[in-house]
Image: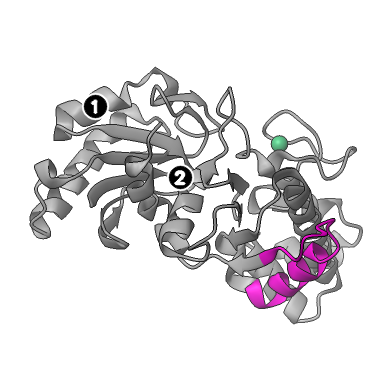
Amino acid sequence: MIALAIELGGTHSVAGIVQGERVIAKETVPSTGSDRLGPTLEQFASVLRKLAAKHQVAFRDCAGVSIAFCGLVDTKRARVLSTNLKYEDAPEIDLAGWARDTFGLHLRLENDARLALLGERFAGAARGFDDVVMMTIGTGIGGAAMMEGRLLRGKHFQAGCLGGHLPMNPRGRLCSCGAAGCAESEASTFALPGLLQSFPGFEQSVLAKATPLDYRTVFEAADAGDDLAQRVVAYSIDVWSALLVGLIHAYDPEVIVVGGGVMKRAARILPALEARAATAWTPWGRVQIQLAQCGSDAALLGAVPLLEEQL
Ligand SMILES: [Zn+2]
């Protein structure tokens, strides 16, 4: 199968062409300076036309267009339901009509974490598994669940994909979703500046003057012996580990695939996640914790199983 694939992410957007288990071409689509989707659609179309011409792919030979969206979507009607500080105009846009008029192709829309799960199951760390949880730790914390070979969506299309908004600290920081103490507001790149400042000793830390304040900087400061950075790393890993156990208890997976930019530090994080997963109540055996293999291609690769899926 050949598919056109678009990822509308929280921090970057990509358009690509997937053939079989490979992304044969992709290109980052720069922001127009606006956070609105409507004015950007023609740029996606023009990138896909260019990539298709370069790789001699005819749109009529493609199975469809897949869009991964960083928010809640109605999978059946292919409409965005709710956004999170990005592409606020998306719920008003008829994306299926756009794909039909622009490429002559059918469109499927899905949440980005669910598409990443499909991609990892199709071509990465969850091959051969029917019961899978995906957890991505980066700007935010993404989640998705598959049970008995079917993506978990639920009546309102929000089942399984709000893992980052499971409460970890009932008196924690206010989250962008409106709740308090979500995993995402306790330990994600998005939450990091507030998290660091809430720790005693921030002013004495090298991080008080560091830019950008991301996990790469924090892990490097921790490696260099900065006390505050070490405490923040330990706290963050605690949050991710607790979330992991929550996801195991919620969705009964055989494997949890962990990805996202923060997992560049997998050597430090993964053993802690595995140790905590071993404490979960799973009398049948041990849940496997796997590092994501598809990297930034996961949500694009998910296009193939998504377009093959019978709704
Ligand atoms: Zn939240």
Q: Is residue 282 magenta?
A: yes
- Residue 6 in the magenta stretch? The answer is no
Disc on the earlier residue, 2 or 1: 2
Farthest-out residue, bottom: 224
Q: Is residue 116 above or below residue 59?
A: below
Q: Which circle marks residue 167 in the picture?
A: none
| Residue linked to disc 1 | 98
Which of the two residues, 230 or 240, is positioned nearer the viewer here? Answer: 240
At label 2, counting other C-alpha atoms closer than 10 Å, the crowd grade (few under 14, some 14-19, many 20 or more) is some
Position in image of residue 62 (x %, y %): 18, 45
The quarter of the displayed image where residue 97 is located = top left
State which quadrant residue 66 falls in. top left
Q: Position of residue 162 (x, y in %)?
A: 65, 38
Q: Residue at x 9, y 48 (%)?
A: 58
Q: Position of residue 257 (x, y in %)?
A: 59, 60
Q: Position of residue 204 (x, y in %)?
A: 85, 67
- Image quadrant holding the C terminus, namely top left
Q: Secondary structure at mark 1?
A: helix
Label 2 secondary element: loop
Q: Amino acid at mark 2?
A: Gly
**On the image, numbered disc 2 is attached to which residue?**
9
Span highlighted in magenta in the image: 266-288
| Figure quadrant of residue 38 | top left
Give the residue drawn at x 20%, y 47%: 48
Q: Is mark 1 within 8 Å of ligand 1?
A: no
Q: Are marks 2 and 1 in contact (CB under 8 Å)?
A: no
Numbered disc in front, either 2 or 1? 1
Determine the CA span between mark 2 and mark 1: 19 Å
Type of amino acid at the residue the image marks with label 1: Trp
Left or right of 81? Residue 145 is right
